[in-house]
Each structure stands twice: as C-alpha cells, then as structure tokens.
Image (cartoon, helix red, strand yellow):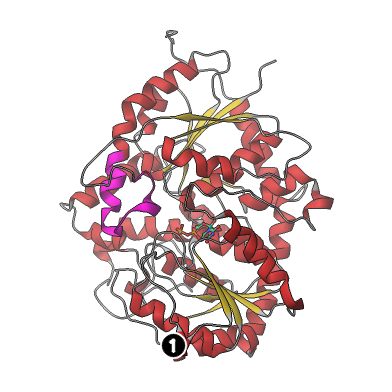
Amino acid sequence: MAKDHIVIFPFMAKGHTIPLIHFAAALSSRNLRITIVTTPGNAPFILQSLPSHSQQQPLDVDLLLLPFPHCPPLPAECESTDQLPSFDLYPLFVGATTLLRQPFERLLHQLMSSDSPPLCLVSDFFLGWTLDICKEVDLPRLVFHGMSTFSMSLCKSLWTHLPHLPVHSEDPFHVPGTPSTLLVTRDVIPDTVLGSVDPLNPATQFLSQLGDSDVNSWGVLVNSFAALDGDDYVRLFESFYQQTNARAWLLGPLSLLSESLQLGESKAASATTTTARGRDDGLDIDEYSSCIEWLNKDNRPPRSVVYVSFGTQAHVSEEQLEEVAHGLEESSYDYIWVVRSEKWSPPTKKGKLNKGKIVRWAPQVEVLKHGATGGFVSHCGWNSVLEGVSAGVPFLAWPMIAEQHLNAKHLVEELGAGLRFESTAADGTSTVVRREEVRDGVRELMGGERGRKARERVVELSEKAKVAVADGGSSRRTLGELIDALRSRPPPQVVLHRT
Ligand code: UDP
C-alpha cells in the first residue's frame, strides 16, 4: 500500500526552512512520504541539513525543484533571504516568490492526480497564495510562521487593534486579549506591524493579504511546546482563525522531536547529531567540525565558553562588531562567535583576539549541546531560542529586528531564562552597545547571580522540552493527532484530470 504523503513548501530563508526539515524527518519516521518543494539554489542546503541520525530507517523525503524567478533588482543568484545584500530587499524577495504560483499550481495538480495524492500542504506564511491553489484541489493548507504563539498572538492582536492603542506614547500598554499582567512598549512591536496603521501603505496591503490567507487556512503548525507557550496565548492565537476547528498544532521543539522519533528515546538523551554540511553553500565543513574540536580541546571546564550568534538575517554594523570583539575579549571568557560579514575582520596586532574562535557558520545545535558551552549571546530568532532552551543554556538576549524583541521579552520577562541588553528597537533604530556593556553582560551571564538564576530556569525548561517530545509528551501526542486528523478527512471533492 502506498504511504500517506505530505507536501512541504518552505520559505526561502534558513530560519524558516530548518524547522520544516525537522518536521519532514519526524513525519518520515512516522512512516509518511514527504515531498519538499524548493528552488535549485536552496536544494543543497536542504539535502545537507536533513538529519543524519536515522541510521535505522532511511528518510523518505524527496525534493521537487521550481526555478526561482528572476526579478531585478534582486541579484540573479539570490534565492534565499540570507543572501540578500540588504534587509530592505526583503519585501521585494517575498513579492518575487509569488511568481512561483503557476509552476506550483501545475505541480500540485500533478501530485493530486498521481497514485499518491498528498494529505495536505504545509506552506510558509509568506507563501500565502498557495491557499487558493489548495482550495482548487480541496487540499488542507497548514501554515507555518516560524514564530511562537506568544509572538504571533501579540502581532495579530496588535495588527487588529493598533489604531486604537496608545502606540505613540512611551508608556507601556495592554494588548487586547492577552493576560492583564502583560504590558508592552512601542519598541518591541515589529515595524511591519507598526506600519499597519497606514492602510494605504503597499506593504500593509500585501501583509494583509498574507494575513487573510493565513487565517483561512486549515490550521497552523507551531514550532513550540505547551509548557513554553502558555494556554492563554495559544487560545488567543487560535481565535483569529476562521475555519471551523482550525487549530494551532504545537509540535516543537521540532529538532528534538525528529531526533527523539528517529533515535528512540533512550539514545536521544545522550546523542550528538553530526549533520554533514558541504562547501557549496558557504558552509565550510572544516570550520564546521573545527568548532566541536575547539570545544573539546584543552579539557575546557564545563559551561566555560560563551556562544555568540546574531542569526541569519540581521545586519550588524562594523562599529558594533568591533565593540563586540573588544567586549568579548575583556570579559575573559572563551567564546565561539558567528560573524556573517565577509568584509569585517577582527582587530589584529596589539588588540589581537586570543580568547575566542570566529566562524562564518557554526553547528549551532551541537555547540549549544556541548558541555563546555555555558551561555548564549543571541539575537533571539525563534529557532535560536528553542535551541538554547532545549540545550539548557541561558541567554544574554540581544534582539535586533522583526519579532525578536517579542521573543526576548517572552524569554527574559515571562520565562526567566536570560538577561538582556537594550539595543536596537524593532522599528530599526539602533544604538551601538558599547564594549563595557558587552563585557559586563557576558560576565553576569556566565558568572553572576542573575546568570545563575537564568541557568536554573532554562535547565527546567530544557527538561520540559524533552518530556514534550518523548513518548506520551504533548508534542509527540499532537503529531499523532495531526496525522489522524488528516487521514480521517474525506477524500477531495473535486474531479481531477490526469496530465
Ligand atoms: N544557524 C546555525 N549556524 C549558524 C547560524 C545559524 O546552525 O552559524 C541556525 C540556527 O541553529 C537556527 C537558524 O540557523 O536554526 C537561525 O534561525 P533563527 O530563527 O534563530 O534566526 P534567523 O534566521 O531568523 O536570524
């Protein structure tokens, strides 16, 4: 009998793709067949990132490729937002992906009339146009944002109520629908949401269309777990969805879920994954394994190294990089620091860096899981938050763009899992964090009382994450319920023509 089949269409950004790769692996280990739709330029990263810890059972994951539309002034070779020369081109990039509509429509029609038609399409929030195509073929669309329900519910409520909120004041205010104890200030609101007060703004109109597709979808896949995203936020978030019984399916942390399903729980606790990465995607394999060798070197004491990464999207100025370099050195802690900039190089000669290792890409999950790692200076992208929480590593939160400020608020004020800097606001205005602040922040994180408390709290959360993905845990049960719900849907109500 043919296996049940699910099609996944990630947005072309590493932070949006990585969790869906783990979702694909989790489904495959539940005996489903997965097709990932992507573009040729993104295929190597996906293939290299598929978990390699499934020795017992090969992954049943295929890739189908659609050429990325050329859309000047986007550089021709740019097929992922991580490659954009400037964050300002992000809306243009999202707009370019709408040109994939026709080829994707043909592809989905073909799959629907094949011997193994899919049970559903999982597609990114930014690919909102996929909903219409799903409706043509009576296929449920599960939307994926890559955010927590905490941030998503706040954004949706803000988007709805913003014109009536005291958003221009400096004072904290309450967001309708959220618990009465939660207050926010303007500087944590993503600029895309702030822009929504002007309905004539083209970006607002485009996001509003994406929002309509989102809330009319069959359900939402969330990379989080019940103990992290409280019930209040999950319920508020679900209340925006319009289809009967639309549900937020909390299946995270997806990387832990796929690992636990594939290894079996007894091994999962002690395993280290060794995902292979190649050189053709800017990922240097020597650099990759050298991070782990560096951590293993010299009998480093447990929790003595700080890991620093600002993710794959935010632009960090050279002036800021310089301050971070000095602050890290002056903290006297050893560090691994991911610097994406190809232009900047660390100070040499007199001010030579000698405590740390600077790389362009680190095996982040493995670095965080390594016993020598004791703190994470992070931009608070949601994947990074989940990865640090899963590994039980406390944060020095340094949010930069988009919903990272909301994530930092959640992480520090609600969950107590970190300390924070006050730096760039979500509207893009930035203040350079000086070296003394970096130095003192790292020292407090690694050796101070507030760091110790955050570590205690994050270790508890890490245990809860492992319970969520283990047999009987909330995320594992929800995965089973999702598959059952999709299998029990009546077959498509449309006549399909074989092509
Ligand atoms: N990542 C990594 N190595 C790096 C930098 C990032 O493996 O050197 C991964 C990280 O583990 C995470 C993703 O890239 O899974 C970044 O996603 P996140 O949501 O944290 O940030 P964003 O991509 O939105 O900046």
Name the residue furthest left: 200
Q: How many marks?
A: 1
The answer to whether 329 is drawn above or below residue 476 in the figure is below
- Residue denoted by label 1: 435
Q: Quadrant of the N terminus?
A: top right
Quick check: is the Cβ at mark 1 less than 8 Å away from ligand 1?
Answer: no
Q: Is residue 23 visible?
A: yes
Q: Is residue 248 visible?
A: no
Quadrant in the picture for residue 366? bottom right
**Span highlighted in magenta in the image:** 78-96
Q: Image point 62% across, 60% down: which residue?
A: 365
Classify residue 423 as left or right of residue 389.
left
Q: Image point 62% across, 49% down: which residue?
A: 254
Q: Is residue 116 magenta?
A: no
Type of amino acid at the residue the image marks with label 1: Arg
Q: Is residue 91 magenta?
A: yes
The answer to whether 63 is drawn above or below residue 78 in the figure is above
Q: What is the magenta segment's predominant secondary structure?
A: helix
Q: Nearer the viewer, residue 327 or 23?
A: 327
The answer to whether 177 is drawn above or below residue 373 in the figure is above
Q: Position of residue 19 (x, y in %)?
A: 55, 48
SS of the residue under disc 1: helix
Q: Position of residue 74 (x, y in %)?
A: 26, 46
Classify residue 273 as left or right of residue 71.
right
